[in-house]
Image: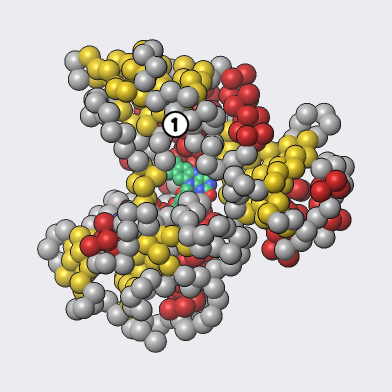
Protein backbone atom coordinates (compact mmCIF):
# COMPACT_ATOMS: atom_id res chain seq x y z
CA UNK A 1 0.00 0.00 0.00
CA UNK A 2 1.23 3.51 -0.79
CA UNK A 3 2.56 5.50 2.13
CA UNK A 4 1.94 9.08 1.16
CA UNK A 5 -1.33 10.12 -0.42
CA UNK A 6 -1.77 13.74 -1.39
CA UNK A 7 -5.24 15.12 -2.17
CA UNK A 8 -5.55 18.36 -4.14
CA UNK A 9 -8.80 20.17 -3.40
CA UNK A 10 -10.27 20.30 0.12
CA UNK A 11 -13.94 20.36 -0.89
CA UNK A 12 -16.67 17.74 -0.72
CA UNK A 13 -14.76 15.02 -2.58
CA UNK A 14 -11.29 15.75 -1.17
CA UNK A 15 -12.59 15.71 2.39
CA UNK A 16 -14.39 12.42 1.79
CA UNK A 17 -11.32 10.72 0.31
CA UNK A 18 -9.26 11.69 3.38
CA UNK A 19 -11.95 10.64 5.88
CA UNK A 20 -12.67 7.33 4.11
CA UNK A 21 -8.98 6.46 3.82
CA UNK A 22 -8.52 6.70 7.59
CA UNK A 23 -11.81 5.04 8.31
CA UNK A 24 -10.73 2.20 6.03
CA UNK A 25 -7.53 1.67 8.00
CA UNK A 26 -4.94 3.50 5.89
CA UNK A 27 -1.95 4.11 8.16
CA UNK A 28 0.26 6.17 5.86
CA UNK A 29 0.49 9.94 5.48
CA UNK A 30 -2.59 11.85 4.22
CA UNK A 31 -2.08 15.42 3.04
CA UNK A 32 -5.21 17.40 2.10
CA UNK A 33 -4.50 20.67 0.27
CA UNK A 34 -7.04 23.36 -0.59
CA UNK A 35 -6.56 26.83 -2.00
CA UNK A 36 -9.51 28.35 -0.11
CA UNK A 37 -8.77 29.79 3.35
CA UNK A 38 -11.41 27.61 5.07
CA UNK A 39 -11.47 24.02 6.28
CA UNK A 40 -13.69 21.81 4.06
CA UNK A 41 -17.30 23.03 3.96
CA UNK A 42 -20.56 22.23 2.19
CA UNK A 43 -21.67 24.40 -0.71
CA UNK A 44 -25.42 23.67 -1.04
CA UNK A 45 -26.46 26.14 1.73
CA UNK A 46 -24.56 28.94 -0.06
CA UNK A 47 -27.54 29.44 -2.37
CA UNK A 48 -30.12 28.63 0.30
CA UNK A 49 -30.03 28.89 4.13
CA UNK A 50 -26.63 30.61 4.36
CA UNK A 51 -27.75 33.36 2.00
CA UNK A 52 -30.87 34.14 4.00
CA UNK A 53 -28.94 34.06 7.30
CA UNK A 54 -30.65 30.91 8.61
CA UNK A 55 -27.38 28.95 8.64
CA UNK A 56 -24.18 30.45 10.04
CA UNK A 57 -20.80 30.00 8.31
CA UNK A 58 -19.41 27.80 11.14
CA UNK A 59 -22.22 25.33 10.56
CA UNK A 60 -21.08 24.79 6.97
CA UNK A 61 -17.89 22.97 8.01
CA UNK A 62 -18.03 19.20 7.62
CA UNK A 63 -15.97 18.67 10.77
CA UNK A 64 -14.12 20.81 13.34
CA UNK A 65 -10.34 21.16 12.94
CA UNK A 66 -9.84 18.64 15.77
CA UNK A 67 -11.25 15.93 13.47
CA UNK A 68 -8.24 16.26 11.16
CA UNK A 69 -5.70 16.40 13.98
CA UNK A 70 -7.17 13.37 15.75
CA UNK A 71 -6.95 11.35 12.55
CA UNK A 72 -3.51 12.60 11.65
CA UNK A 73 -4.74 14.15 8.42
CA UNK A 74 -2.52 17.07 7.44
CA UNK A 75 -4.91 19.77 6.29
CA UNK A 76 -3.40 22.81 4.59
CA UNK A 77 -5.74 25.62 3.63
CA UNK A 78 -4.61 28.50 1.42
CA UNK A 79 -2.40 26.02 -0.48
CA UNK A 80 -2.62 26.48 -4.25
CA UNK A 81 -1.13 23.71 -6.40
CA UNK A 82 0.26 24.96 -9.68
CA UNK A 83 1.73 21.86 -11.30
CA UNK A 84 1.99 18.08 -11.26
CA UNK A 85 5.27 16.43 -12.26
CA UNK A 86 4.09 12.91 -12.95
CA UNK A 87 7.51 11.48 -13.74
CA UNK A 88 9.03 12.70 -10.47
CA UNK A 89 5.80 12.17 -8.44
CA UNK A 90 5.95 15.75 -7.26
CA UNK A 91 3.57 18.67 -6.88
CA UNK A 92 4.48 22.33 -7.24
CA UNK A 93 2.81 24.88 -4.99
CA UNK A 94 2.24 28.58 -5.69
CA UNK A 95 4.49 29.49 -2.74
CA UNK A 96 7.43 27.68 -4.38
CA UNK A 97 7.32 24.50 -2.32
CA UNK A 98 7.63 21.08 -3.91
CA UNK A 99 5.79 18.14 -2.38
CA UNK A 100 6.30 14.44 -3.08
CA UNK A 101 3.46 11.94 -3.42
CA UNK A 102 3.15 8.20 -3.87
CA UNK A 103 -0.47 8.44 -4.94
CA UNK A 104 -2.28 11.63 -5.91
CA UNK A 105 -6.00 12.43 -5.87
CA UNK A 106 -7.30 15.38 -7.89
CA UNK A 107 -10.51 16.72 -6.33
CA UNK A 108 -10.34 20.22 -7.75
CA UNK A 109 -14.08 20.68 -8.33
CA UNK A 110 -15.39 23.35 -10.66
CA UNK A 111 -15.62 27.12 -10.91
CA UNK A 112 -18.51 29.39 -11.82
CA UNK A 113 -18.63 29.86 -15.58
CA UNK A 114 -17.85 33.42 -16.70
CA UNK A 115 -19.83 35.37 -19.26
CA UNK A 116 -17.92 36.69 -22.26
CA UNK A 117 -19.67 40.06 -22.65
CA UNK A 118 -18.57 43.65 -21.92
CA UNK A 119 -19.03 44.89 -18.35
CA UNK A 120 -18.42 41.75 -16.31
CA UNK A 121 -15.67 43.46 -14.32
CA UNK A 122 -18.01 46.11 -12.86
CA UNK A 123 -18.67 46.33 -9.10
CA UNK A 124 -21.94 44.57 -8.33
CA UNK A 125 -21.28 41.54 -10.58
CA UNK A 126 -21.47 38.27 -8.65
CA UNK A 127 -20.69 34.61 -9.18
CA UNK A 128 -21.52 31.92 -6.63
CA UNK A 129 -19.21 29.03 -5.91
CA UNK A 130 -17.36 29.78 -2.68
CA UNK A 131 -18.16 30.97 0.81
CA UNK A 132 -16.43 34.25 -0.05
CA UNK A 133 -18.79 34.67 -3.05
CA UNK A 134 -21.82 33.90 -0.86
CA UNK A 135 -20.72 36.40 1.80
CA UNK A 136 -20.51 39.19 -0.76
CA UNK A 137 -23.84 38.25 -2.34
CA UNK A 138 -25.62 37.99 1.04
CA UNK A 139 -24.40 41.46 1.98
CA UNK A 140 -25.62 42.83 -1.37
CA UNK A 141 -29.09 41.33 -0.90
CA UNK A 142 -29.63 42.90 2.51
CA UNK A 143 -30.77 46.25 1.07
CA UNK A 144 -33.55 44.80 -1.13
CA UNK A 145 -31.81 45.62 -4.43
CA UNK A 146 -32.89 45.08 -8.03
CA UNK A 147 -31.17 41.78 -8.79
CA UNK A 148 -30.80 40.39 -12.29
CA UNK A 149 -29.83 36.72 -12.44
CA UNK A 150 -28.32 35.40 -15.66
CA UNK A 151 -29.22 31.71 -15.99
CA UNK A 152 -32.27 29.71 -14.87
CA UNK A 153 -30.35 26.69 -13.58
CA UNK A 154 -30.47 25.42 -10.01
CA UNK A 155 -28.23 28.10 -8.54
CA UNK A 156 -30.09 30.91 -10.33
CA UNK A 157 -33.48 29.61 -9.16
CA UNK A 158 -32.38 28.94 -5.59
CA UNK A 159 -30.81 32.37 -5.23
CA UNK A 160 -33.99 33.92 -6.67
CA UNK A 161 -36.05 32.24 -3.94
CA UNK A 162 -33.64 33.36 -1.22
CA UNK A 163 -33.42 36.89 -2.65
CA UNK A 164 -37.22 37.24 -2.74
CA UNK A 165 -37.34 36.16 0.92
CA UNK A 166 -34.87 38.98 1.61
CA UNK A 167 -36.96 41.55 -0.25
CA UNK A 168 -34.96 41.87 -3.48
CA UNK A 169 -36.71 42.52 -6.81
CA UNK A 170 -35.59 39.68 -9.05
CA UNK A 171 -35.50 39.12 -12.81
CA UNK A 172 -34.04 35.94 -14.31
CA UNK A 173 -32.71 35.96 -17.87
CA UNK A 174 -32.36 32.63 -19.62
CA UNK A 175 -31.05 32.25 -23.17
CA UNK A 176 -32.87 28.94 -23.68
CA UNK A 177 -36.62 28.58 -23.94
CA UNK A 178 -37.20 27.33 -20.39
CA UNK A 179 -35.61 26.81 -16.97
CA UNK A 180 -33.43 23.79 -16.11
CA UNK A 181 -33.16 22.78 -19.76
CA UNK A 182 -30.19 20.44 -19.20
CA UNK A 183 -31.15 19.00 -15.86
CA UNK A 184 -34.91 18.59 -15.43
CA UNK A 185 -38.03 17.78 -17.44
CA UNK A 186 -40.27 20.59 -18.70
CA UNK A 187 -43.09 19.61 -16.31
CA UNK A 188 -40.83 19.91 -13.26
CA UNK A 189 -39.17 23.13 -14.46
CA UNK A 190 -42.52 24.75 -15.28
CA UNK A 191 -43.91 23.86 -11.84
CA UNK A 192 -40.97 25.55 -10.15
CA UNK A 193 -41.13 28.58 -12.46
CA UNK A 194 -44.85 29.01 -11.67
CA UNK A 195 -43.97 29.16 -7.96
CA UNK A 196 -41.27 31.75 -8.65
CA UNK A 197 -43.72 33.88 -10.64
CA UNK A 198 -46.24 33.66 -7.78
CA UNK A 199 -43.45 34.91 -5.49
CA UNK A 200 -42.89 37.91 -7.77
CA UNK A 201 -39.87 36.78 -9.82
CA UNK A 202 -39.88 38.00 -13.45
CA UNK A 203 -38.48 35.79 -16.24
CA UNK A 204 -37.10 36.56 -19.71
CA UNK A 205 -36.66 33.33 -21.67
CA UNK A 206 -35.09 32.94 -25.08
CA UNK A 207 -32.79 35.95 -24.94
CA UNK A 208 -29.15 36.27 -23.97
CA UNK A 209 -27.17 39.09 -22.41
CA UNK A 210 -25.22 41.31 -24.80
CA UNK A 211 -23.58 43.57 -22.18
CA UNK A 212 -23.63 44.57 -18.54
CA UNK A 213 -24.17 48.31 -18.34
CA UNK A 214 -22.30 50.43 -15.82
CA UNK A 215 -22.18 53.86 -14.27
CA UNK A 216 -19.12 55.09 -12.36
CA UNK A 217 -17.65 51.59 -12.29
CA UNK A 218 -20.81 50.01 -10.85
CA UNK A 219 -23.51 47.88 -12.43
CA UNK A 220 -26.47 49.95 -13.62
CA UNK A 221 -28.29 47.48 -15.85
CA UNK A 222 -28.21 44.64 -18.33
CA UNK A 223 -28.56 44.91 -22.11
CA UNK A 224 -30.31 41.92 -23.67
CA UNK A 225 -29.71 40.41 -27.08
CA UNK A 226 -33.30 41.29 -28.10
CA UNK A 227 -32.54 44.99 -27.58
CA UNK A 228 -34.28 45.42 -24.20
CA UNK A 229 -32.50 46.94 -21.19
CA UNK A 230 -33.15 46.08 -17.55
CA UNK A 231 -32.10 48.31 -14.65
CA UNK A 232 -30.10 46.46 -11.97
CA UNK A 233 -28.17 47.18 -8.78
CA UNK A 234 -26.57 43.73 -8.75
CA UNK A 235 -26.14 40.96 -11.32
CA UNK A 236 -25.55 37.31 -10.48
CA UNK A 237 -24.05 35.31 -13.31
CA UNK A 238 -25.34 31.80 -12.76
CA UNK A 239 -24.43 30.32 -16.12
CA UNK A 240 -23.24 26.91 -14.94
CA UNK A 241 -19.93 25.53 -13.74
CA UNK A 242 -16.71 24.76 -15.60
CA UNK A 243 -14.50 21.94 -14.29
CA UNK A 244 -11.15 22.91 -12.73
CA UNK A 245 -8.93 20.92 -15.06
CA UNK A 246 -5.86 23.15 -15.45
CA UNK A 247 -3.56 20.83 -13.46
CA UNK A 248 -4.85 17.68 -15.14
CA UNK A 249 -4.65 19.19 -18.62
CA UNK A 250 -1.07 20.34 -18.11
CA UNK A 251 -0.22 16.86 -16.81
CA UNK A 252 -1.80 15.24 -19.89
CA UNK A 253 -4.57 13.37 -18.03
CA UNK A 254 -7.52 15.74 -18.52
CA UNK A 255 -9.25 17.95 -21.06
CA UNK A 256 -11.41 21.07 -20.77
CA UNK A 257 -14.53 18.90 -20.39
CA UNK A 258 -13.17 17.08 -17.35
CA UNK A 259 -10.78 14.41 -16.08
CA UNK A 260 -11.81 11.02 -17.50
CA UNK A 261 -12.05 8.36 -14.79
CA UNK A 262 -13.43 4.84 -14.47
CA UNK A 263 -15.71 3.45 -11.74
CA UNK A 264 -12.74 3.27 -9.34
CA UNK A 265 -11.81 6.91 -9.96
CA UNK A 266 -8.66 5.89 -11.85
CA UNK A 267 -7.23 8.31 -14.42
CA UNK A 268 -4.93 7.26 -17.26
CA UNK A 269 -1.99 7.52 -14.80
CA UNK A 270 -2.00 4.51 -12.43
CA UNK A 271 -0.85 6.69 -9.51
CA UNK A 272 -3.39 9.47 -10.00
CA UNK A 273 -7.08 9.28 -9.10
CA UNK A 274 -9.81 11.91 -9.36
CA UNK A 275 -13.23 12.49 -7.81
CA UNK A 276 -16.08 15.00 -7.80
CA UNK A 277 -17.15 17.81 -10.12
CA UNK A 278 -13.85 17.77 -12.04
CA UNK A 279 -14.36 14.23 -13.37
CA UNK A 280 -15.89 12.77 -16.52
CA UNK A 281 -17.39 9.38 -15.79
CA UNK A 282 -19.57 7.04 -17.84
CA UNK A 283 -21.99 6.06 -15.09
CA UNK A 284 -23.89 2.87 -16.05
CA UNK A 285 -27.21 4.74 -15.66
CA UNK A 286 -26.08 7.56 -17.95
CA UNK A 287 -25.52 7.85 -21.69
CA UNK A 288 -21.74 8.06 -21.97
CA UNK A 289 -19.07 10.09 -20.16
CA UNK A 290 -20.52 13.08 -18.30
CA UNK A 291 -19.83 15.35 -15.37
CA UNK A 292 -22.27 14.84 -12.52
CA UNK A 293 -22.30 17.92 -10.32
CA UNK A 294 -23.74 16.87 -6.98
CA UNK A 295 -22.86 16.17 -3.39
CA UNK A 296 -23.82 12.50 -3.76
CA UNK A 297 -21.56 12.05 -6.79
CA UNK A 298 -18.61 13.69 -5.03
CA UNK A 299 -19.11 11.54 -1.92
CA UNK A 300 -19.70 8.20 -3.65
CA UNK A 301 -16.88 8.71 -6.13
CA UNK A 302 -14.54 9.71 -3.29
CA UNK A 303 -15.45 6.55 -1.39
CA UNK A 304 -14.68 4.45 -4.49
CA UNK A 305 -11.31 6.21 -4.82
CA UNK A 306 -10.45 5.63 -1.16
CA UNK A 307 -11.39 1.95 -1.51
CA UNK A 308 -9.25 1.59 -4.63
CA UNK A 309 -6.31 3.23 -2.82
CA UNK A 310 -6.80 0.72 -0.01
CA UNK A 311 -6.65 -2.10 -2.55
CA UNK A 312 -10.36 -2.87 -2.26
CA UNK A 313 -12.75 -3.34 -5.14
CA UNK A 314 -15.76 -1.07 -4.52
CA UNK A 315 -16.57 0.67 -7.82
CA UNK A 316 -18.94 3.64 -7.96
CA UNK A 317 -22.15 2.25 -9.44
CA UNK A 318 -24.69 3.67 -6.95
CA UNK A 319 -27.80 5.41 -8.26
CA UNK A 320 -27.02 9.15 -8.45
CA UNK A 321 -29.31 11.52 -6.56
CA UNK A 322 -29.72 15.24 -6.18
CA UNK A 323 -31.93 17.77 -4.43
CA UNK A 324 -32.85 21.44 -4.66
CA UNK A 325 -34.83 23.57 -2.18
CA UNK A 326 -36.90 26.48 -3.48
CA UNK A 327 -39.47 28.21 -1.23
CA UNK A 328 -41.45 25.51 0.62
CA UNK A 329 -40.74 22.95 -2.13
CA UNK A 330 -38.18 20.18 -2.20
CA UNK A 331 -37.14 18.77 -5.55
CA UNK A 332 -35.46 15.36 -5.40
CA UNK A 333 -34.02 13.52 -8.38
CA UNK A 334 -32.92 9.89 -8.47
CA UNK A 335 -30.99 8.58 -11.48
CA UNK A 336 -29.74 10.42 -14.54
CA UNK A 337 -32.16 11.94 -17.02
CA UNK A 338 -31.68 12.20 -20.79
CA UNK A 339 -33.80 14.22 -23.26
CA UNK A 340 -34.61 11.10 -25.30
CA UNK A 341 -36.17 9.26 -22.32
CA UNK A 342 -39.91 8.62 -22.30
CA UNK A 343 -41.46 10.59 -19.41
CA UNK A 344 -44.53 9.72 -17.38
CA UNK A 345 -46.00 12.23 -14.91
CA UNK A 346 -47.56 11.32 -11.55
CA UNK A 347 -49.47 14.37 -10.37
CA UNK A 348 -51.28 14.64 -7.03
CA UNK A 349 -55.00 15.08 -7.75
CA UNK A 350 -55.04 18.03 -5.30
CA UNK A 351 -52.19 19.68 -7.25
CA UNK A 352 -49.72 19.38 -4.35
CA UNK A 353 -46.90 17.18 -5.60
CA UNK A 354 -45.56 16.01 -8.93
CA UNK A 355 -43.24 13.18 -9.92
CA UNK A 356 -41.90 12.55 -13.41
CA UNK A 357 -40.59 9.07 -14.18
CA UNK A 358 -38.07 8.52 -16.99
CA UNK A 359 -38.04 5.26 -18.94
CA UNK A 360 -35.28 4.14 -21.30
CA UNK A 361 -36.07 1.01 -23.33
CA UNK A 362 -38.82 0.32 -20.80
CA UNK A 363 -36.53 0.49 -17.79
CA UNK A 364 -37.00 3.09 -15.04
CA UNK A 365 -33.75 5.12 -15.13
CA UNK A 366 -34.71 8.29 -13.26
CA UNK A 367 -37.45 10.01 -11.29
CA UNK A 368 -37.85 13.67 -10.42
CA UNK A 369 -40.16 14.47 -7.52
CA UNK A 370 -41.46 17.74 -6.14
CA UNK A 371 -42.93 17.13 -2.68
CA UNK A 372 -43.40 13.40 -3.29
CA UNK A 373 -40.58 12.06 -1.09
CA UNK A 374 -42.02 8.55 -0.96
CA UNK A 375 -41.93 8.26 -4.77
CA UNK A 376 -38.33 9.43 -4.71
CA UNK A 377 -37.20 6.94 -2.04
CA UNK A 378 -38.98 4.03 -3.67
CA UNK A 379 -37.79 4.98 -7.16
CA UNK A 380 -34.16 4.82 -6.05
CA UNK A 381 -34.65 1.15 -5.22
CA UNK A 382 -36.50 0.38 -8.47
CA UNK A 383 -33.82 2.13 -10.52
CA UNK A 384 -31.06 0.18 -8.77
CA UNK A 385 -32.96 -3.07 -9.38
CA UNK A 386 -33.41 -2.32 -13.11
CA UNK A 387 -37.21 -2.62 -12.93
CA UNK A 388 -39.36 -2.24 -16.07
CA UNK A 389 -42.62 -0.89 -14.62
CA UNK A 390 -46.04 -1.05 -16.25
CA UNK A 391 -46.49 2.49 -17.73
CA UNK A 392 -50.24 2.70 -16.94
CA UNK A 393 -49.77 1.87 -13.28
CA UNK A 394 -46.73 4.14 -13.13
CA UNK A 395 -48.93 7.03 -14.31
CA UNK A 396 -51.40 6.46 -11.45
CA UNK A 397 -50.24 8.60 -8.48
CA UNK A 398 -52.32 6.43 -6.13
CA UNK A 399 -50.21 3.32 -6.93
CA UNK A 400 -47.16 3.04 -4.64
CA UNK A 401 -43.98 2.71 -6.71
CA UNK A 402 -42.78 -0.16 -4.55
CA UNK A 403 -45.75 -2.17 -5.82
CA UNK A 404 -44.33 -1.90 -9.35
CA UNK A 405 -41.17 -3.84 -8.47
C1 LIG B 1 -24.14 27.43 -4.52
C2 LIG B 1 -24.12 25.94 -4.74
C3 LIG B 1 -25.25 25.21 -4.37
C4 LIG B 1 -25.25 23.81 -4.56
N1 LIG B 1 -26.35 23.12 -4.20
C5 LIG B 1 -26.36 21.75 -4.34
C6 LIG B 1 -27.50 20.98 -3.93
O1 LIG B 1 -28.50 21.51 -3.47
N2 LIG B 1 -27.43 19.63 -4.06
C7 LIG B 1 -26.32 18.99 -4.57
O2 LIG B 1 -26.29 17.76 -4.67
N3 LIG B 1 -25.24 19.71 -4.99
C8 LIG B 1 -25.24 21.06 -4.88
N4 LIG B 1 -24.15 21.79 -5.29
C9 LIG B 1 -23.03 21.08 -5.94
C10 LIG B 1 -22.05 20.52 -4.93
O3 LIG B 1 -21.74 21.46 -3.95
C11 LIG B 1 -20.80 20.08 -5.69
O4 LIG B 1 -21.19 19.07 -6.60
C12 LIG B 1 -19.70 19.56 -4.76
O5 LIG B 1 -19.23 20.59 -3.93
C13 LIG B 1 -18.56 18.98 -5.57
O6 LIG B 1 -17.50 18.64 -4.72
P1 LIG B 1 -15.99 18.71 -5.23
O7 LIG B 1 -15.15 18.29 -4.09
O8 LIG B 1 -15.88 18.01 -6.51
O9 LIG B 1 -15.75 20.24 -5.54
P2 LIG B 1 -15.64 21.47 -4.54
O10 LIG B 1 -16.54 21.26 -3.36
O11 LIG B 1 -15.82 22.68 -5.36
O12 LIG B 1 -14.14 21.42 -3.99
C14 LIG B 1 -13.03 21.62 -4.83
C15 LIG B 1 -11.99 22.39 -4.05
O13 LIG B 1 -10.76 22.30 -4.75
C16 LIG B 1 -10.08 23.51 -4.61
N5 LIG B 1 -9.08 23.63 -5.67
C17 LIG B 1 -9.28 23.69 -7.00
N6 LIG B 1 -8.10 23.80 -7.66
C18 LIG B 1 -7.13 23.82 -6.73
C19 LIG B 1 -5.71 23.90 -6.79
N7 LIG B 1 -5.05 24.00 -7.95
N8 LIG B 1 -5.01 23.88 -5.63
C20 LIG B 1 -5.66 23.79 -4.44
N9 LIG B 1 -7.01 23.70 -4.32
C21 LIG B 1 -7.73 23.71 -5.45
C22 LIG B 1 -11.20 24.53 -4.73
O14 LIG B 1 -10.81 25.77 -4.21
C23 LIG B 1 -12.31 23.86 -3.92
O15 LIG B 1 -12.28 24.26 -2.57
C24 LIG B 1 -24.12 23.17 -5.12
C25 LIG B 1 -23.00 23.94 -5.49
C26 LIG B 1 -23.01 25.30 -5.31
C27 LIG B 1 -21.80 26.12 -5.72
Q: Position of residue 145 (x, y in %)?
A: 40, 17
Q: Secondary structure at mark 1?
A: loop
In which quadrant will I find the N terminus? Answer: bottom left
Where residue 148 sits, quadrant-wise, is top left
The answer to whether residue 374 is visible is yes
In which quadrant will I find the C terminus? Answer: bottom right
Question: Residue at 40% of width from left, 82% of height from top?
Answer: 27
Nearer the observer, 267 or 233: 267
Most extreme residue toward the bottom is 1
Q: How many marks?
A: 1
Q: Position of residue 315 (x, y in %)?
A: 54, 73
Where residue 33 sits, quadrant-wise, is bottom left
Residue 281's place in the image compared with 399, above or below, is: below
Question: Residue at 76% of width from left, 48% of height from top?
Answer: 374
Residue 9's place in the image compared with 271, above or below, is: above
Determine whether, in the image, residue 33 is placed left or right of residue 287: left
Residue 213's place in the image compared with 129, above or below, is: above
Q: Position of residue 282 (x, y in %)?
A: 51, 63
Question: Residue at 49% of width from left, 76% of height from top?
Answer: 307
Q: Position of residue 117 (x, y in %)?
A: 27, 28
Question: Residue at 16% of width from left, 58% of height from top?
Answer: 94
Circle 1 packing at 10 Å, graded few (<14), some (14-19), many (20+), is: many
User: Residue under circle 1?
Assistant: 151
Nearer the observer, 141 or 306: 306
Check the image and tell me how it is coloured.
secondary structure
Amino acid sequence: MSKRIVIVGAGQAGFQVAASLRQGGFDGRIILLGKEPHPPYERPPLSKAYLTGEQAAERLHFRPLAFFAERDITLETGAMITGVDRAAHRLHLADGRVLAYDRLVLATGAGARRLDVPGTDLAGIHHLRTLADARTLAAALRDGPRLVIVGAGYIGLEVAAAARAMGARVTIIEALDRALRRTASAAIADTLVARHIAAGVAFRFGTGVSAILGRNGRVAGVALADGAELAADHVLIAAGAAPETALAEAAGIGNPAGIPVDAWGRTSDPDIFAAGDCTLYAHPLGCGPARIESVQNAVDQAKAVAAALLGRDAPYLAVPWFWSDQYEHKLQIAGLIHPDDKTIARRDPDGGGLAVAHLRAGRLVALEAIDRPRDYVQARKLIAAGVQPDPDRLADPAVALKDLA
